[in-house]
Amino acid sequence: MDLVFVQSGLLEKFLDTDVIAAAEVASLLRRRGVRDGAPVFLDENTQMPLLPLCEYGKYLATALLDESTLKDYGRVLGRLDNHLADLGSDVLSATETDLISYRSHRTQSQEKPIGASAWGKESFVLDDFYGFLVSRKFLSRRPVRLAARGRNALAPRVRSSMDIRHLTFDQYRYFRDVGLGGQLANSQVDSTFRGWSPLRDRAGADIALGSGTRWREWSTLLLPEVGLWPGMPGGAAEFVVQACAKYGKARTVYVPKDATASADLFCLLERPDIVRRAAQTLERKARDLFVVSKVDTAGGCVRGILDGVVREFQISAMPPKLRRAAVFEGKFGLEALSLFVCRGGLMPGADAWKGYRHRAWTRMNALADETTPHLPTRRWRWHDLRHTYALRLLAYLENIMDGSESDVHARRRRHRSYLTGHIRHNPLLIVSRRLGHANPETTYQYLQYTDDLINEFEAAFSSWVSDDEVTYAEMASDAMAGANAGRR
């Protein structure tokens, strides 16, 4: 089986024939609601659509899923079909043991087994797929028996909590300045550093930490959103994120002035050279780009030409794909409207930012010595900066409300009143709104990290494990001496 994805932007390049026009196909896709990223499953010999799989792909295309999610769902079914083919089966004739075999392959026997969280997502797709086949009469019943309360029997038995990992101040500065910025541990410039755009990477880290946004939210920022546009006052920035937010849930994001100053420094020193080098490349691609002619900063919208048609969009409603294609006429020619740009002149993608982070991690470990902060065994993720933001903000707000109270009294008062009232001023709910959590219960998981109990742990067990205290031999000797005295 061959797996491909709908990409309407490629129609004009590869599908315009005497039989059918590319514009007709694009119009048909829009009329049928088939979105970019929808998976299409083809027979590898005849290149004809495979009916049940393609029907499910069409069903997914009508759901409110973004392009990357559609592709992920398609890949899950592609892996399942390949595994079943090796077993001499297919999705319609698969049995419960076949699907259990697939689970064992993914979670145990493949070269890099996936964890419970990743398998939980795959099992959801499989459960949804077979529910679709039953509802559309492709199957009379699911191949896997339902567990108690209708639960998917293939799902992980243990529900994993959030993997909350955060950085201390020293760790963040080491990550930003040494790993991303190319400095040495003593703050001197490293003449051997070969990083291509350290100010861009540092600005990305500062905005991620200062705003607490998810990777897709801060990496797709446009210049007007952070106030780096002619006529805007600069300083701290505040804007609405929606299309790039998780589940498309709109919320207001605040970027402090220190973070925007870091981005401004990148725009002054590094960005012009990147833009100048890529201007001719973007000119050649102008037909495939969204060429913006007007930016209305007050109304939060942009107007320009996309696919030969004048279009206007609310900035907050622009998805990542459209943001990546947005350019304007700058000093050197066409220039990306996005804040962050890479060698090609457009917005860096997920793989690019992953590469920046991985190279920083390698560098940090290579330069680590006894003076550097502790580095965990697993390399940091961009999302760890969001966790750091949440914990720092939560601890700060709680400390403001606690005042000079001792930890014991403050903690007792929090559990009595903070979590049951004061909705507007509750630190936990403030952080929940800033993070854009759909359910405050998600934010509750940060509570276990807000009180630093290390000192309490040390005090509780210091006399148990310390060699400075009396030894067991001495205790036994005293006990024996006491027993002998009693006999006399």
Image (spheres, grey):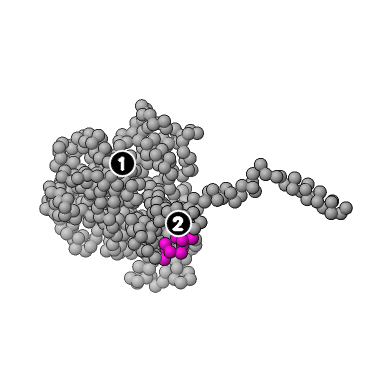
Residue 443 image position (x, y, % from top left): 40, 58
Q: Which residue is drawn at 19% across and 35% down?
A: 276
Left or right, residue 11 beside residue 440:
left
Q: Give the range drawn in magenta.
A: 411-420
Q: Quadrant of the N terminus?
A: bottom left
Asked whether residue 18 is in view, the answer is: no
Say whether residue 112 is visible: yes
Which disc number belongs to residue 447? Answer: 2
Q: Of 465 and 151, which appears nearest the observer? A: 465
Of the pair 283 and 334, the residue shown nearer to us: 334
State which tag comes first along the sequence, 1 or 2. Answer: 1
Query: What's the magenta bit mostly, secondary-structure-wise?
Result: helix
Q: Furthest-top residue in view?
A: 191
Compute the Cα span from label 1 to label 2.
29 Å
* Magenta stretch: includes residue 9: no
For the residue labelled by badge 2, is the local secondary structure a helix, a strand or a loop? Answer: helix
Looking at the rendered structure, the kind of residue marked 1 is Ala
Residue 209 in picture, x, y percent from top left = 35, 46
Neighbor class of circle 2 (other Cα within 10 Å; few <14, some 14-19, many 20+) is few
Q: Which residue shows up at 18% across the image and 46% down it?
A: 232
* CB within 8 Å, label 1 to label 2: no
- Read off the residue under disc 1: 203
Q: Which amino acid does label 2 sit on?
A: Leu
Q: Please say if 250 is above or below 378.
A: below
x then y, percent, for residue 275: 21, 37
Q: Is mark 1 on a helix, strand or loop?
A: helix
Q: Residue at x 42, y 62 (%)?
A: 418
Give the quarter of the image for residue 431: bottom left
